[in-house]
Image (cartoon, rainbow, N blue to C red):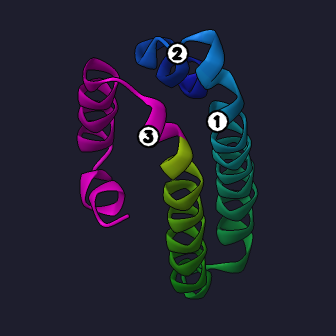
Amino acid sequence: MHIALIKYALNLRPEQESQWAPVEAALRDLAQWQTMTAHEVNFVGAGERGAAGNGVVTRLKRIATLAQPLIKVLDQAQRRDMMALARSAGLEQLLAAH
């Protein structure tokens, strides 16, 4: 549901949809991985949290890389909205670094 809200907030034009597809797939992968990891940590214990944190960073960097073609085709209003979304999620520095 959050992914659909992000897409809605970006107000993508039809010609931007192809650049959104890989970002959406990576976001879905992250969400699925987080669900599986949270379940595993509950059973394995706190020792797995460090490894899980590394996995999150790797996946977030992948999303930022995949988002670059999309960012290039966004207009100023869409970029502003995307940065506001990133800021609210604590990811602004990650996107700004790419």
Residue at 24% in and 32% down: 84
Single out the residue that lies furthest toward the bottom. Answer: 47
The residue where tag 1 is placed is: 19
Distance from disc 2 to disc 3, alpha carbons, whole Å, reads 11 Å
Q: How many marks?
A: 3
Earlier residue among tags 1 and 3: 1
Report whether 73 appears left or right of 15: left
Amino acid under disc 1: Gln
In the image, is residue 50 above or below residue 39? below
Above/below status of 71 relative to 45: above
**Which numbered disc flags the more N-terminal residue, 2 or 1?**
2
Q: Quadrant of residue 25?
A: top right
Residue marked by disc 2: 12
* Element class at badge 3: helix
Look at 35% across and 55% down and name the residue there: 95
Q: Position of residue 46 (x, y in %)?
A: 54, 81
Residue that badge 3 annotates: 71
Please tell me which residue lies in front, 47 or 70.
Answer: 70
Q: Nearer the viewer, residue 44 or 23?
A: 23
